Image: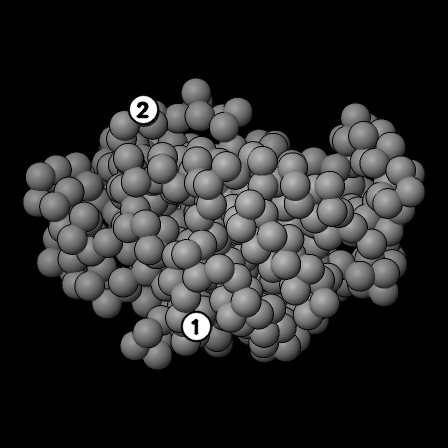
């Protein structure tokens, strides 16, 4: 079977087949809410999309009109969109290249200069911790709302031992495609502050379910992608991929709108509950694969060659020259990892024009976007496949 970074990366035949016939009840829904509340120490609200949860976090914070929100200058368009949909202004903070996240010093300088800054979103890029201790200090000093975005870092621990998601005023989780917990779609918001009755009533009055077509696409996605990967080598999978994409059955993660409160169907909650129970096993596997990359790759490629305690290792980033040539070289060997997080400061590039980002806002982020690739650690990468990836990359870099 060909190697992919995404395209149903978290599904094998059994899980894909089971997903076709998944079902759930209100009990599963409430169980998930209770489990998340206990894990993160706050009130849990469930959503169909993580970006809906992030937007609602900003609305619940009741920030001043036209306030600014600091976000990573190396992130997904979904974050930018959530901020603007909440009626706020994204403020792009450049990254430290070794951690792919902005530092507390960068945040402090902005907070000192711009009084419009009222909130901060930290994302722990690719599952590697930001400097949460110092960032938290800056937030307290300047009275900034702190939001933890766990899209990449569910299950991660910060260097001081705290579980990611137990620090901020609000916490967003996503259970979408290719994330640590992958139920195709799903999100949650954890709130540890008092919220207004107006916000609560707005959620209740705007509650609706995903459309029947959305649920059908989600239900078939795992099996469709598994079958594509299984038959890609003989050409059938590639044809099926093109056909299903044209029909809209292989949507891209950032596509679609999220106006209003789209609730999480119980069948998704049931799957998320199952995956939460297997979270530790998932993370151990990712750490094992990442260890192979670190120990056997040319050390010049690594951003940080040391194993990071508590990291999630959603993907392992490396810095390369001639990236496009390397990706073509790998593809010729059946290694398809061209879907880069991120190939634009606010990725994917097709959405850059819809953002307020301007060339030069975040120079380090722009350099990273042109030189990084990230290596897969998901369940469909075993030790043999990891070593194949390493071998091909080392072969290319010696040329």
Circle 1 crowding by C-alpha within 10 Å: few under 14, some 14–19, many from 20: few
- Residue that lies at the very extreme toward the front in this rendered image: 399
Q: Position of residue 217 (x, y in %)?
A: 78, 41
Q: Residue at x 27, y 62 (%)?
A: 131
Nearer-the-camera pick, 292 or 71: 292
Nearer-the-camera pick, 66 or 322: 322
- Residue that lies at the very extreme toward the left in this rendered image: 112
Q: Position of residue 367 (x, y in %)?
A: 36, 37
- Residue that lies at the very extreme toward the top in this rendered image: 353
Q: CA distance from mark 2 to mark 1?
A: 35 Å
Residue underneath mark 2: 358
Residue underneath mark 1: 307
Q: Position of residue 356 (x, y in %)?
A: 34, 25
Labelled disc at residue 82: none
Please say whether residue 217 is visible from this viewpoint: yes
Nearer-the-camera pick, 152 or 272: 152
Decide which of tag 2 and tag 1 comes sooner along the chain: 1
Q: Residue at x 32, y 24 (%)?
A: 359
**222 above or below 274?**
above
Quarter of the image for the N terminus: give it: bottom right
Determine whether the residue tagged by mark 1 lies in a helix, strand or loop: loop
């Amino acid at each position: 079977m060909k190697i992919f970074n995404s395209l149903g990366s978290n599904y094998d035949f059994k899980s894909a087949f089971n997903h076709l016939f998944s079902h759930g009840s209100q009990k599963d829904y409430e169980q998930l809410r209770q489990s998340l509340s206990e894990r993160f120490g706050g009130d849990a609200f469930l959503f169909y999309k993580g970006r809906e949860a992030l937007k609602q976090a900003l609305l619940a914070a009741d920030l001043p009109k036209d306030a600014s929100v600091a976000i990573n200058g190396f992130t997904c368009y979904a974050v930018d969109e959530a901020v603007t949909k909440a009626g706020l202004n994204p403020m792009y903070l450049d990254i430290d290249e070794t951690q792919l996240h902005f530092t507390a010093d960068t945040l402090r300088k902005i907070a000192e200069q711009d009084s419009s800054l009222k909130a901060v979103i930290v994302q722990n890029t690719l599952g590697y911790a930001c400097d949460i201790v110092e960032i938290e200090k800056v937030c307290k000093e300047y009275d900034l709302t702190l939001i933890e975005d766990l899209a990449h870092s569910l299950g991660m621990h910060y260097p001081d031992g705290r579980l990611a998601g137990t620090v901020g005023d609000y916490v967003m989780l996503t259970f979408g495609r290719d994330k640590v917990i992958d139920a195709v779609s799903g999100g949650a918001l954890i709130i540890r502050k008092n919220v207004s009755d107006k916000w609560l009533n707005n959620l209740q009055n705007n509650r609706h379910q995903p459309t029947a077509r959305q649920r059908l696409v989600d239900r078939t996605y795992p099996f469709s992608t598994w079958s594509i990967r299984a038959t890609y080598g003989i050409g059938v999978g590639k044809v099926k991929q093109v056909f299903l994409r044209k029909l809209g059955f292989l949507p891209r993660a950032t596509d679609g709108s999220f106006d209003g409160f789209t609730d999480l169907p119980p069948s998704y909650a049931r799957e998320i509950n199952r995956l939460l129970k297997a979270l530790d096993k998932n993370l151990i596997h990712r750490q094992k694969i990442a260890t192979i990359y670190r120990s056997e790759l040319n050390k010049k490629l690594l951003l940080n060659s040391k194993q990071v305690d508590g990291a999630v290792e959603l993907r392992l980033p490396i810095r390369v020259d001639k990236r496009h040539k390397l990706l073509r070289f790998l593809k010729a060997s059946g290694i398809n990892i061209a879907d880069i997080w991120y190939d634009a400061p606010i990725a994917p590039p097709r959405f850059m024009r819809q953002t307020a980002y301007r060339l030069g806002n975040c120079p380090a982020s722009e350099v990273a976007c042109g030189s990084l690739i990230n290596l897969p650690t998901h369940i469909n990468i075993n030790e043999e496949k990891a070593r194949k990836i390493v071998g091909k990359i080392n072969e290319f870099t010696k040329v």
